[in-house]
Amino acid sequence: MEKIKVGIVNVTGYAGIELARLLVRHPFVELFSVTGRSTAGQKLVEVFPHMTGAADLTIESELGNVEFAFAAMPHKESASEVMKLIERGIKVLDISADFRLSNPEDYNEWYGFTHPSPELLDKAVYGLPELYRKDIATADLVANPGCYPTGAILAMAPAIKHGIVEEDIIIDSKSGISGAGRTLTTVSHYSEANENTTAYALKGHRHLPEIVQELTFLSGEAVNVTFVPHLVPMTRGILSTCYASLRSEFADKEDLQAEINVIYREFYKDEPFVKVVDAPPHTKNTWGSNMCHVYPFVDLRTGRLIVVSCIDNLVKGAAGQAIQNMNIMSGFAEVAGLEAPPIYP
Amino acid sequence: MEKIKVGIVNVTGYAGIELARLLVRHPFVELFSVTGRSTAGQKLVEVFPHMTGAADLTIESELGNVEFAFAAMPHKESASEVMKLIERGIKVLDISADFRLSNPEDYNEWYGFTHPSPELLDKAVYGLPELYRKDIATADLVANPGCYPTGAILAMAPAIKHGIVEEDIIIDSKSGISGAGRTLTTVSHYSEANENTTAYALKGHRHLPEIVQELTFLSGEAVNVTFVPHLVPMTRGILSTCYASLRSEFADKEDLQAEINVIYREFYKDEPFVKVVDAPPHTKNTWGSNMCHVYPFVDLRTGRLIVVSCIDNLVKGAAGQAIQNMNIMSGFAEVAGLEAPPIYP
Amino acid sequence: MEKIKVGIVNVTGYAGIELARLLVRHPFVELFSVTGRSTAGQKLVEVFPHMTGAADLTIESELGNVEFAFAAMPHKESASEVMKLIERGIKVLDISADFRLSNPEDYNEWYGFTHPSPELLDKAVYGLPELYRKDIATADLVANPGCYPTGAILAMAPAIKHGIVEEDIIIDSKSGISGAGRTLTTVSHYSEANENTTAYALKGHRHLPEIVQELTFLSGEAVNVTFVPHLVPMTRGILSTCYASLRSEFADKEDLQAEINVIYREFYKDEPFVKVVDAPPHTKNTWGSNMCHVYPFVDLRTGRLIVVSCIDNLVKGAAGQAIQNMNIMSGFAEVAGLEAPPIYP
Amino acid sequence: MEKIKVGIVNVTGYAGIELARLLVRHPFVELFSVTGRSTAGQKLVEVFPHMTGAADLTIESELGNVEFAFAAMPHKESASEVMKLIERGIKVLDISADFRLSNPEDYNEWYGFTHPSPELLDKAVYGLPELYRKDIATADLVANPGCYPTGAILAMAPAIKHGIVEEDIIIDSKSGISGAGRTLTTVSHYSEANENTTAYALKGHRHLPEIVQELTFLSGEAVNVTFVPHLVPMTRGILSTCYASLRSEFADKEDLQAEINVIYREFYKDEPFVKVVDAPPHTKNTWGSNMCHVYPFVDLRTGRLIVVSCIDNLVKGAAGQAIQNMNIMSGFAEVAGLEAPPIYP
């Protein structure tokens, strides 16, 4: 099989360079073109010395002639870039938030801009393969989910879908600092972030409407979500601890834990990248890989379901999931290029 | 004023050595005797090279002739040690859990032993000065609160006391690794703990009955508590994010945030070690100090009060609060020996 | 090509489990058997939850019927295990130190035991492919170099070989904590190791005779080595900064830096896993990979050559180099199973 | 005794805010005025939430009426600021490099500017109390040593002074990231710095001429210095490992280690902030304090003296030493305000 040519728009952010790391070893694609702004003209390996395996790649200012493109731009900028690529007949996986929300109004409220292409929004598919695999397979434009939504939705989807819990959910997420990006900020300055834990964005993180949209879709009814993200001093990983009240018909069941274990395992039984585990998961056990570990726990004392999930925010939460989507869109084995185990310790 | 002689039973754990660090600079006490088991006979500074300021202190196997003792033993072992000290007429601050729970049955259920001295349990005072200052002042035995309960109770006390929220609370806490102690364990092995976040003890952490006891006492009604502790890769600090539903009479109030700010500030207005803050607190801003920062936030979208608190688990969560209690028990200025600012960055 | 069956003796240490991580993705081998002591009978994935890709593998007490074995035992214990494997006709890569030193006396001096099989010592090849590729190709027993020696020897080999520096070398190495192993120790307890840097083993680290042996062999004359290892708070990585005086015939050369760059590049020009770089290397740029970055720098001010090298101590410093050796011993492509780029950030 | 009024110019860098932390608890001074540029007009505690103990202090654009000033400006900018303060009759401790080098030419070579006040350079005293206590006591302007020079000079001073080693020294230093300052840079971006170790500035760090100047002064002869600084992933701390060849008259001495121990202990016997230790020191054992631990080790195998020292780069390497100097300049007890033990773990 001939390899298809793929490109990365804005390779110089953490999602972009993580795409490059994974794509250079992908069996069915050739990483043909990568772009960057301030670094255009430089060899990729000059800017990122770990990329010795892509010694010939030069960062360009415009994307070359590829069949498939990953857009790893900041939100708002991405939309117009994606529109141009789609017009060129290139299939696109967009890492940004610009095509995740189905209601164009949400962009005004949460991102502060009027969406330039509501009709493309209609065609874009939300790229969570565990929920939308079929739609992804035929899509020309897939919107990669946010890192927090990926972990949170995978944690709660089986419970919501099966009506086990009330439509009122608390998501307490703990993220590594790479989630804050490669742009320099005080919050990600080493001496500020190290030996520090903090909550942030209590007034409303931009990933909230995305979580609400998907959980509401799964439930069929409006789902109330309290979402509090936190920063913890590590580079990679998101652990989400989700809390929801059991519906009354479940709260008194004997063996509810066993029943829920069955439901979760059944829900994810064919999923290559979701594993339902029997003990609280560690972010480290997904480090560098596309795996999501999910641990549902019934707290009979308080009548709650607690679900803990973890992912690597740059892989299943960004570049890995993007490649999983590309694999589906391109008819490749879904796991192609994503089979390396997590790195431990 | 002549200094009183104080001692530390089991100086070699993290709480014990933190007591030593703070006590050697306390203006009104002399750190006169410290004990340890395997290290008895060695100079303190040999075992802990940072303690150059206590070059003359030798670790003993039995506590010398002191007026006040800090017991920093593991639970169960502490109770019998404390009983002996009380019989010798020595005032005791017990760092362990052995005198925190007022119901002796709880020790059977949560700690797996029958409490050897229920009558002493009756006399012991729960050492959270913000709630029990008067009782502490006259007590001979004070039980220092656990690290998680300290942060959680200080976060929720004003809201519970004022009936702002329902008696059903979720506490999601993130602790640094020193909370797991100085004893070697896989969970606190560097290569396992570093670059890792995990939840643990979902089936019931031993600090849960302590939190329930105190919040129930504050409320007057039984309080339902879901408590999930987490380990994050830092040495010191606990951040607790607490979630509770607003009672209906509060949920629709205009300016509820402002009202709650006033309630919290009023509640803690005379407290030297609690500060109500206007932005999500950072554990780093309490590092090495006895401060607790508390941030109440009204999430009108979901009708919840979210309160984030942070402390240094070894100071306000252990040794610092112990000294604060000793100050109160001894008639010293409550802040004596505890005035050094946190260390940043 | 049919895959060969390989096994790992003692999979439960960090080198052992890192071998497993890499071998499950190796194109030409089947990871057929793994052993452990206290964990025998458990599934590998129960003990190491990240190993979801080897869900069928059970830890055994004795190695199964394999064609090639990796011995990842502690020193001294390894020798007798290796002897048994060799007798069974199995080719062996020994991760331990037991077959690295050619002089049996050295084991008495540095490791405190009398070597049980000096004749096997004669047959064992020192597994640094950059120096001994040909001998490795035909060996039945290869001794994997230590982590520190790998970085140090690769840094200095070209300079020593070309007689550029005096035979008196200072090696100042900084290692991540995983180098101290998976066994619990105070030095690798999180709260002790975090936010801490220290030197250790100044009286003579066990890797010193290994470094001396190889540099002396390269030089033809006895090489004097001062080696001071340090622990720095990270999980993986070794950075070695090596200092040596330029021989007088080089000290005054114009363009010596350029000349040495050429020598180093020439020396390593066919090496897949050594890259001579133009700026001080970062351990992070080799993280999780088998790469070694080497940076030679001429300090004309003081007449010294300074060479900085870095590796991932668990890959090029242990499991990766072991697989590189197996590839050579088995006639596979040398890079098979080792091509994944480092993980950044 | 009435407290003297002191001020900090540029309180918003790490050295500046560390001065504030220590000065608010100093028994003999009142922190009366602090300045900052972009933050002028804000309360100190708004910008630095840990400074609850200085709730009344507002950041100003110009320094108020103080008797003593700490200038914590970047180099070059500091010189002109200091000149103005001296003209106002204020004693000054300058944290910057602008008055450390006695030869004005060095500023052109190493810092790229022509020194604006060579005559003030003559009057300035190099503020290493262990070497210049008497001169500091009568000075109006003291130049605080750099962080690296402090650790390196204290390590080597006794050996150089006593002629134990050759005048050719290698200093391999490992610094925490706070040494790179509070200004945002890629090198101190969390995800880049974490889990990473690197060497830098091999072509000549600006602290090199300072080290050479002082060691040469101690020796009486020109001292050759190779200095390679490294960044390791921790916030605070510098460990310096120094290597020098023993002079021939010492190399063969029996009991040289014991003799050197005596020399080092004698040299520092009255020093409150230098401790000669018997085992390799840990940066953690000086964390947050003004202590320097020094460990001299004789490597008879190679005829070298190795000296390892460690300090907290922001305390003995900056703000603490600055206060020690102020104490001497003002006739206070030298340890005033600096007596708190290091924080461990």
Image: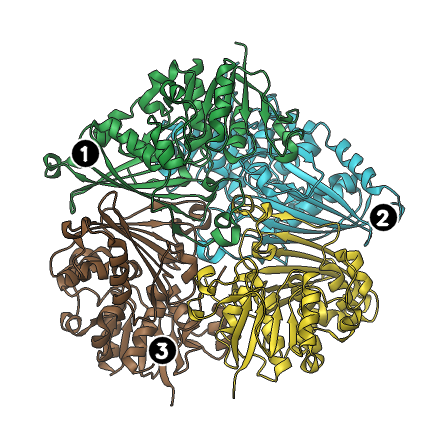
Chain colours: A cyan, B yellow, C green, D brown
Please state the horizontal and vertical placement of residue A273, each as a whole percent of the image. 64, 32
Residue type at numbered disc 3: Gly
Rendered image quadrant of residue C64 = top right
Vertical relation: D189 (above or below) B216: above
Please state the horizontal and vertical placement of residue A242, each as a whole percent of the image. 71, 48
Secondary structure of the residue carrying numbered label 1? helix
**Separation (CA) of disc 1 from disc 3:** 51 Å
Mark 2 sits on what residue? A247
Vertical relation: A121 (above or below) D333: above
| Tag 1 and tag 2, C-beta contact below 8 Å | no
Q: Is residue A41 left or right of residue D46?
A: left
Q: Is residue A288 left or right of residue D264?
A: right
| Nearest the eye: B278 or C185 | C185
Please state the horizontal and vertical placement of residue B70, each as a whole percent of the image. 61, 71
Residue type at numbered disc 1: Ala
Mark 3 sits on what residue? D7
Residue type at numbered disc 2: Arg
| Dot 3 crowding, Cα within 10 Å, few <14, some 14–19, many 20+ | many
**Separation (CA) of disc 2 from disc 3:** 62 Å
Q: Do we see residue A43 in this rendering?
A: no
Q: Is residue A344 left or right of residue B156?
A: left
**Separation (CA) of disc 1 from disc 2:** 74 Å
- Do marks 1 and 2 share a subunit? no
Q: Quadrant of the C terminus of chain B?
A: bottom left
Rendered image quadrant of residue C45 = top right
Mark identifier at residue C37: none
Q: How many marks?
A: 3
Mark identifier at residue C258: 1
| Dot 2 crowding, Cα within 10 Å, few <14, some 14–19, many 20+ | some
Q: Chain of mark 1?
A: C
Q: Residue furthest bottom?
A: D1
Vertical relation: C77 (above or below) B253: above
